[in-house]
Amino acid sequence: MSAPHRPPDSHYNINVTLSDMTSLDRELPDTRPPICAKLKYDIKSLPKVSIVIPFFNEAPTMLLRNIHSILNRSPDELLEEIILVDDLSYDAPLMEPLERFIKNIPRISLLRNDQRSGLIVSRMRGARIAKAPAIIFLDAHSEVNEGWLEPLLDQLRKNPKQVLQPFIDGVDNMNLQFSAPSVYFKGTFSWDLRYTWTKIADHEQERAVETGEPFITPTLVGCALAVMKDYFFDIGSFDEGMYVWGGENIELAFRAWMCGGKAVTVTCSRVGHVFKQSPNKFDGTKGSKEETVQKNLIRVADVWMDGMRKFFYGTTLMFDFKRLKLGPADLKTLRERTELRKKLKCHNFEWYLYNVVPEMLDLPPMEKDYYVGMTYFCFEHKIIPKNNFAIMKNGLMTYRDKCVKINQPKPYLTLAECPPESEIDKFGKWDLVNYGMNWGGIKVSIVKDDGVVVYWCIVQVTNAMPQHRSEQMPQLGTCDSSDSFQIWSFTYAVDFTLVPEYMSVYEQKL
Ligand code: UD2
Ligand code: MN
């Protein structure tokens, strides 16, 4: 079924000849659990699908390989159409050459936006004209693997009230190598509403591998989604008040879960996605990327998070460029979304946390005015699975109800009961050194019995202990501002002072 393999060209090489079509597909490693290849589907019972692919100045080789992978690996009976939506690209190969290329392909259509509309609006354009009962949204730089379609459609047949994502495999953005993670992740979120990956429990992964069954996901990654058209429009499709890019995947997942549906990862459906190194181009759009994304996220928080949106504001307002208030036009469409939520009689956000992401019930300590959540170590090696280390204004570093203590004489980090205020100096007082908005060095000072003050900084160390071979460990060392192994990036720095003001903007709207 697959065309002969040939070395992949660069993601950024847009000068490939479009006439050279068949070589654009390639053999991919079968990354599914072995059971998946044995599962049988009754093709006749499955809904047909329209595939919607928005693109803005994407590498044409990726787009063409994507189209070929779909055509080669989807049963004819199931593929109704592929709808390409050009979001006002200006790269030459995506103009006339692309039209020439798709002219001879049946079941493919190309819409061109007359203004840059962003991925959300572009997807909606495709979704509205989709002829099939099921819709799949794909990013332009995807590559679908063997047997990808049937398990998705079979899940939708069994339960139309859900939003599915295939299992996303990685496509390396330099050499286009296709690879599957050996650890299975679900989608979660941070309080500033970024998409985060969280490992699923071992027994859940074992079950998924053994049976090929799907597993639930609290949020959706966004680059590939499968949904029944009727259900999608019944629950409010995408929030078309969102601009360009960002947040729509979190919003759709919150909404599906809270309004009677669910979000699920389909183990046996594999789709590769290029995680781009260079960030999305926001050229030709109003406002900076950060502002645009923040505007979208404000909508997610205000419509769906109830009182818990104080954590969103508390973890984003420290950046002055994120202190945005929506204008009248945006507030109007925002109000429509809050009305939609009422109409759908959705659960509240607390219900969602309890039932879908209970691990998020460990709430950040918002009553304190200085809080830094530490997740990523130097070079983004993840050492702590949760964002619950906090440096408080009084100098204590807390972890849940415990405090990080310095043991002596050879100093090392342990957890202990928190001391009374009067003993913090001897216990270990923490502070940030050489820090920026959400990064910096972490210093601890201790007053010894003889009154001498000693201090250390946290350093990233590899192979620190035999039981933690090759893991990145935090250790205490001599402070050195030029040592990049002493720079941490923080998940949040909370500024609670502005939160009430931003919360009240929302209250007035209702
Ligand atoms: C992620 C998602 C993406 C979307 C986005 C949040 C993953 C892996 N991918 O970023 O699907 O959910 O987060 O919104 O999570 N595009 C346009 N017009 C634009 C911008 C983008 O048509 O103004 C197209 C783009 O060509 C691509 C798709 O929309 O086909 C998604 O954009 P992306 O791939 O740059 O987003 P990504 O994967 O970095
Ligand atoms: Mn993408």
Image (cartoon, rainbow, N blue to C red):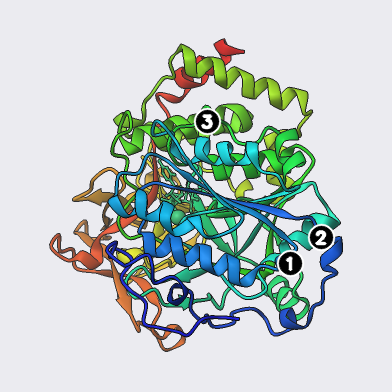
Q: Using the image, tell me which numbered label, if any, was put on residue 150.
A: 1
Q: Position of residue 320 (x, y in %)?
A: 30, 29
Residue 111, x across and y down, in percent: 50, 41
- Count of all numbered marks drawn on residues in the image: 3
Q: Residues within 10 Å of mark 3 (few under 14, many from 20)?
A: many
Is there CB contact under 8 Å for labels 2 and 3? no
| Residue beneath disc 3 | 310
Q: Residue furthest left?
A: 482
Place of residue 330 in the rendered image (x, y in percent of width and height, measured from the top left): 49, 19
**Rendering quarter of residue 471:** bottom left
Residue sitting at x 23%, y 45%? 436
- Residue 204 position within the rendered picture, expressed as x and y whole percent measured from the top left: 72, 70
Q: Residue at coordinates 61% horizontally, 33% vertically from top-left?
A: 305
Callout 1–callout 2 Cβ contact below 8 Å: yes
Residue under label 2, please give it: 46
Residue nearer the viewer, 212 or 305: 212
Note whether 130 is above or below 449 in the view shown. Answer: above
Amino acid at circle 2: Leu
Q: Secondary structure at mark 3?
A: helix
Quadrant of ligand 2 in image:
bottom left
Any atom of ligand 1 within 8 Å of the CB at mark 1?
no
Q: Which residue is located at x 39 percent, y 46 percent?
A: 56
For mark 2, give the secondary structure: loop
